[in-house]
Each structure stands twice: as C-alpha cells, then as structure tokens.
Image (cartoon, rainbow, N blue to C red):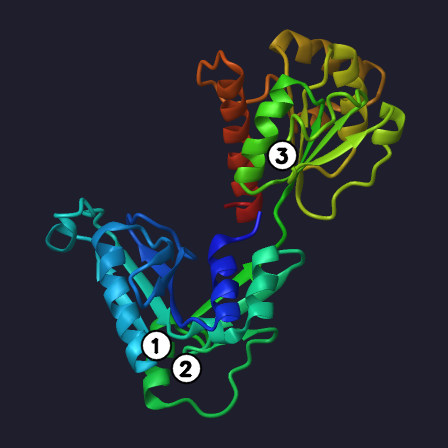
Amino acid sequence: MNDPVFDALAQAARAGEAVALGIISGVKGSSPQKVGAKAIFYSDGRITGTLGGGCLEAEVQQRAIQSLRTGQGSTFELVLDHDFGWDDGLICGGKVMGLIIPEAQQSGEEFWTALAARSSKMSWGVSPEFKVQSSRFKVQGPLSAEAQRDASLVGGELLYKEDIAPPCALWIAGAGHIAQAVAPLAWQLDFEVTVFDDRPALVSHRFFPREVHLQSDVWEKLLAVPSPQTPSFGLVVTRGHRHDALVLQNWIHRPFEFLGMIGSARKARMIFDHFVAEKIATREDLQRVACPVGIDIQSRTVPEIAVSILAQFIEKRARTAAGPGD
C-alpha cells in the first residue's frame, strides 16, 4: 500500500502544483498525532493527510498557506492546552513541534514516487534551510543565522529525518473464510500479504483483493517458498489440525517475528507436545506461537475474529519496530 501523502506529493510534482508539506517532528505529553504525521496543504484549502485535526491543523494550515505565498519554511511549536484547543476539543495537554516546507513538490515526482512505493529501504530528511534531502543528508556550506537558529531547535543538522522501509510481510496459510476476512484488512493496515493454499478454487482474486499475493500448489512446494526479506509474520488458518501442524512444522523454523495459529488451547497443547516429543521444535521455539491467535475481545463472527487477530499482529509489529528493550 503506497503512502497517500507521498503519492499526493508525486501527483503535485507531476501537475506542477505548489503545495506545502507539514510534518510533526516532536511531541511532548499527550497529542492527537505522533512524530512523523504529515499533511499536504494546497493553496485552495484542500488537505491530504492529517496532523491531528481540529485547531492544531487549522493553525498549521494558515501558516502553510502563508509559506506558499512567501516561499519561506518555518517551524512551529503549539501547546494543546485549555486556551488553545477548547472549542475543537483538543485539550490533550501536550506540546507539538513541527515544520512546514513550502513548494515540497519541487523535490520531483520520481523522488516522492520512490518514497510512496517503499520498495526498498530509503532515508530522507529536511535541512535547516527547509530543503528536502536524501542519501547522506550532508548540509553543504555555511548556514544562515536563521537556519542555525532553526537547527538548534532540534539539536542537529537536520530538522527532520525519516527512514522508509518496505511493509512487513504477512504470510497466511489457508485461504478459507478466516483468511478471506484477514487478508484485505491486513493489506489496509500496511502488511504485504501472501496467502498460501493447496485448493486452487479458493486461491483466487474472486475472494481476495488484487493487492494480495496468492500462491497455490501442493503443500510440499508451498513450504519450500523462500522466506521474505523484510520483517515477517505468519498466520496458520488451514482447513484442519493436520494441515496446521504440517505448516507449523516448517514455519516454526523460519525467521518470523511472530506466529499465530487458529484453534483452542487444547489443540495447542496437543501439537506442541507432539513437536517437543518428536524433537520437531523446542519449547523455546514454540513460545513464538500464539494459539489461540488473537486478543480476547469475545469475538464470535468472522469479521470480529479477523479484528482480534490483526490487533495482536499490529501490537507485535509495533514491538518489532521499537526494537529490544523498548
């Protein structure tokens, strides 16, 4: 799934339309958005993306439109207190810092399209001169007094830096009703989804969005497919215990960040005890497997089960992104 803000910047570059890019570069306390939130502001009042809505976004929008008139970038620091946000309900009590880059589309269609696609790891940032930079981010030459002041606000050569990486992979074993509910939602939630099954009638875009990758073959061949090169997660929801165990026997030895398997606690005990007894996997290996998968939200329907599963995967993905100890 392409990033809509980067996509819109690429479109603006293609059309030669002037836009200002607003970015949240710092947050203290409670706020409606996190660091990295972005919005594009057009001269006619349109907005793509969001910095949190309400009075915060309205204030930044005014500054962004002014920046399009003057061509001057700026930083901002807004306190979301009673006085500032009461009318719009934004009394979070936190502080939001950010920057506005006028004429952001001038970095070019190719640059923004590459960031939107996220097909490989990239880094980009904004210099103290409010210029978009990529690659090594080296600021060349002496800085103006104003640029030095702005740089001191963030304590470095860049006002903002962001690393872009391909989305995490989600492999789903089984193409039945659970997979058909999970896959499209997972794609919307920024997973690169692949569904595997040995039943060709089910492995079809009649049941899955075009954006979902499909693989159909005998399980022997499906289980030989090389692992993804990006951080990856696995979900085992085949048509029965035997097939679940067959897939898990292979996937437990792959570098998945997390594995989930449909079923009961009793099913998990039976399969796990068998794996340990037959030396297929250790107890430590099996700690990476959640069965029953999903958080307990008293789900009953298939869509509710899909939500419970993906809530757990989102939490695991966030922990993976944060790194050890975070």
Asked which quadrant contains residue 265, the reply is top right
Residue 154 visible (yes or no): yes
* Secondary structure at numbered mark 2: loop
- List x then y, in percent, for residue 238: 72, 18
| Three-letter code for the amino acid on which mark 2 is drawn | Glu
Rendered residue at 51%/35% (across/down): 315
Q: Secondary structure at mark 3?
A: loop
Residue carrying label 1:
73
Few, some or many C-alpha atoms within 10 Å of disc 1 (few <14, some 14-19, many ≥20)?
A: many
Q: Earlier in the sequence, mark 2 or mark 3?
A: 2
Q: Which residue is mark 2?
A: 129
* Label 1 or label 2, whichever comes before in sequence order: 1
> From this viewpoint, is residue 323 visible?
no
Residue 77 versus residue 136 in the image, above or below: above
Q: Nearer the viewer, mark 1 or mark 3?
A: 3
Amino acid type indicated by mark 3: Pro
In the rendered structure, find residue 303 and report the number of the disc placed on it.
none
Read off the residue under disc 3.
209
Give the distance between the C-alpha atoms of the residues marked 1 and 2, in whole angstroms: 8 Å
Q: Residue at x 43, y 57 (%)?
A: 36
Residue at the spot x=63%, y=13% of the render? 263
What x and y, as percent, mark residue 319? 53, 41
